[in-house]
Amino acid sequence: MKQIIASLLAVALAAVGPVVAFGHYQTSQNEKKQKAEEKKKVKELMSRKLELSHKLLTAMILNDTQSAVKSAKDLLEVSKDPAWQSLIPKDRLEEYQIWSDSFRKNIRKIGESAKENNLDGAKMGYLEMTHTCFNCHTYIRDFVITRLDKNDSAKTNLFANR
Ligand code: HEC
């Protein structure tokens, strides 16, 4: 009897094993797919950010306050998209948010100054914003990616050639 139970059990396990393994395989494939999609979204968002900052520069050069107000508004929206911070590890989010906040503060300064036709204020805001572009990227390169390099293969595009 014991033997029959043992062999029944063996048959059952043999049947269940591959199903469980396939389940794991599927989960990891889904995770990979999700990560790839997330990266694609981030890339699109960051290109849009670059495009809008170019538009802002053009508006500043041409003293086009209307266009500056519009691009500042769009750039602010970009920084509020969930993809803006989706690649940042949890333990780095707090610092990342400090850079994001200062980025948004500078953009608001551009928008508000442009609305009041204060071109000097808007230009100053633009310079300060650009400074934040550099600072945030330096922060990510020096602190976030170094950590990712060690623990994770999820390197982001900006720093892929390191
Ligand atoms: C609060 C942080 C932060 C600020 C501020 C910031 N960025 Fe970024 N930027 C990122 C992150 C995160 C990425 C994604 C990194 C990646 O995909 O490798 C990125 C990616 C980029 C990329 C894409 C690089 C690539 O390899 O595809 C460009 C271009 C870029 N940023 C330009 C700018 C410009 C221009 C500004 C200022 C107007 C700016 N960024 C401000 C965090 C920031």
Image (spheres, rainbow, N blue to C red):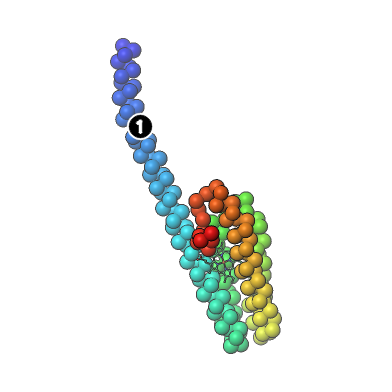
Seen from the viewer's position, the closer of residues 9 and 152 is 152
Task: Please identify the quadrant where the N terminus is shown.
Answer: top left
Characterize the local packing of mark 1: few (<14), some (14-19) or many (20 or more) Cα atoms within 10 angstroms: few
Residue 105 drawn at (x, y percent): 67, 70
Rendered location of residue 159, percent (x, y):
54, 61
Disc 1 residue lies near ligand 1 with CB under 8 A: no
Residue 112 in view (yes/no)? no
Q: Position of residue 54 (x, y in %)?
A: 55, 78
The quarter of the picture where residue 75 lies is bottom right
Q: Is residue 129 above or below residue 7?
A: below
Residue at image position (65%, 66%) is 135
Q: Position of residue 69 (x, y in %)?
A: 59, 79
Q: Quadrant of residue 133?
A: bottom right
Up-down relation of residue 142 to residue 111 (above or below): above
**Residue at position x 47%, y 66% from top?**
44
In the picture, measured across the screen, residue 143 lies left or right of residue 52, that is right
> Do we see residue 125 in this rendering?
yes
Give the structural element (helix, strand or loop) at label 1. helix
Where ligand 1 lies, by image quadrant?
Answer: bottom right
Instruction: Name the residue located 35 percent from the left edge and 39 percent from the top edge.
Output: 22
Depicted 129 relative to depicted 84: above or below: below
Query: Is residue 104 toward the left or the right of residue 78 in the image?
Result: right
Q: Which residue occupies the foreground of this view, 143 or 113?
A: 143
**Looking at this rendering, what residue extends furthest in the bottom direction?**
62
Q: Residue at x 53, y 72 (%)?
A: 50
Kind of residue sitting beneath label 1: Gly
In the rendered picture of this protein, how many numbered marks are placed on residues? 1
Q: Residue furthest front?
A: 162
Residue carrying label 1: 17
